[in-house]
Image (cartoon, rainbow, N blue to C red):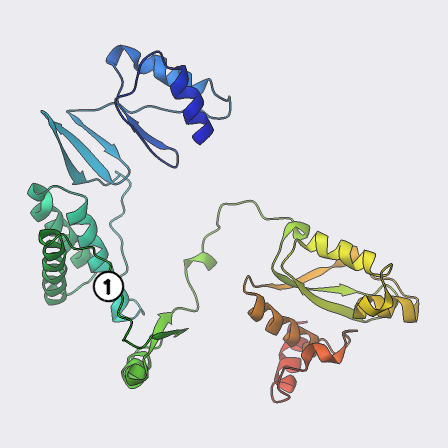
Amino acid sequence: MEDLERSCISNLDFDLPFYVRYVDDILTAVPKEKIDYTLNIFNQYHPRLQFTIEIEDNNAINFLDLLLIHNNTKIKTDWFHKKTWSQRYLNFNSHHPMSHKIGTIFNLVDRAIKLSSTEFHEKNLSLIYNILRWNDYPHGLLHKHINKRRSHINNLLDNNIDSAPADDNNRPATTFIPIPYVSGLFESLNRLFTKHNVKFVGKNSKDLQIVFDSGKDRIPMGKRSNVVYKIPCNDCNQVYVGQTGLHLNTRIKEHQRNVQENEERHTALTKHVTNQQHTFSYDNTNILCEEPNYYKRLVLEMCNIVGHTNSVNLRQDVEHLSNIYKPLISAHISHIV
């Protein structure tokens, strides 16, 4: 996009009074007789990059979440909503911590006030109230937290204070721990651990991601990274379990080259190949799980080595795993397999 900007803007035969872009949304001003000309310049850059244009209507135009209103020599702003806006937010009766629901109120109040001129504040706050009532939020809760957040924002604006709190070097750092949210128990744990500067963050074990397709093409197995995998032996029933942050294809090539390296650098897979004169079926490599965090991925690798009793892996691969867990892991993995 930056290269497109430099190329297209330099090809225009006039100067743009202003030019604003966020990702692929562009806001600018051109003479009326230059509208089609400007659009053609941008669309000629590359056949696969084709722009559409939206022209100011009734002295107003939207850009992202803003409605920009041209008022003589001034620009007023209002909070803009697309026609497809569903008005659905986190329902008050959903199984989430109260902090998430209050955060929903605060987030909407922030947008209603910060994105709009003063004359639109009442309209937007009233809209928030009606929408959240439709999402089952109680009247008292809305009245309390809408006013609380509004007063907070106005205080910051009146005193020209940055919304980010100042660092307090004397205050002990708070440790945040994510745990599955269970109503009642979660709140009790937070009250209990406050004195220890520990705060639990509620998370749900299931979300909408398991219901809806991402819409993206599935990544080929060989191009997937941050995985725990297993490779079966062609000549016996044993497998090799490993983990990698690289593309799986890259890691497999490393395994294939490892046999040519010094014996001290041989992996358990290579030792099985050289000692037993067996070969591994790299084409039948199977991904057991994905985990971007390196240390969590190591734990998953250990669990799968323990669970696959027919693995050729050296036992020092699991030396950091307590024996208490090994029977449970073995039973669980064998059940899946």
> x, y (%) of residue 297?
59, 68
The answer to whether 305 appears left or right of 296 in the picture is right
Residue 294 x/y as whole percent: 58, 66
Q: Residue at x 39, y 33 (%)?
A: 24
Name the quadrant containing residue 59: top left
* Vertical relation: 284 (above or below) 33: below
Q: Quadrant of the C terminus?
A: bottom right
Residues 19 and 218: in front is 19
Judged left or right of residue 316, residue 120 is left
How far from the left and from the top, in percent, is residue 184?
29, 81
Q: Can residue 254 be seen?
A: yes
- Asked if residue 281 can be seen in this view, the reply is no
Q: Residue at x 7, y 48 (%)?
A: 122
Task: Return the residue found at the far front.
Answer: 169
Vertical arrangement, residue 234 with respect to residue 174, above or below: above
Reading the image, the residue beneath label 1 is 166
In the displayed structure image, the side of residue 299 where residue 274 appears, left or right: right
Q: Give, as a three-letter code, the residue at label 1.
A: Ala
Please tell me which residue is depicted at 13% across the width and 47% down the height of the picture: 124
Secondary structure found at label 1: loop
Q: Residue 117, relative to residue 157: is it above or below?
A: above
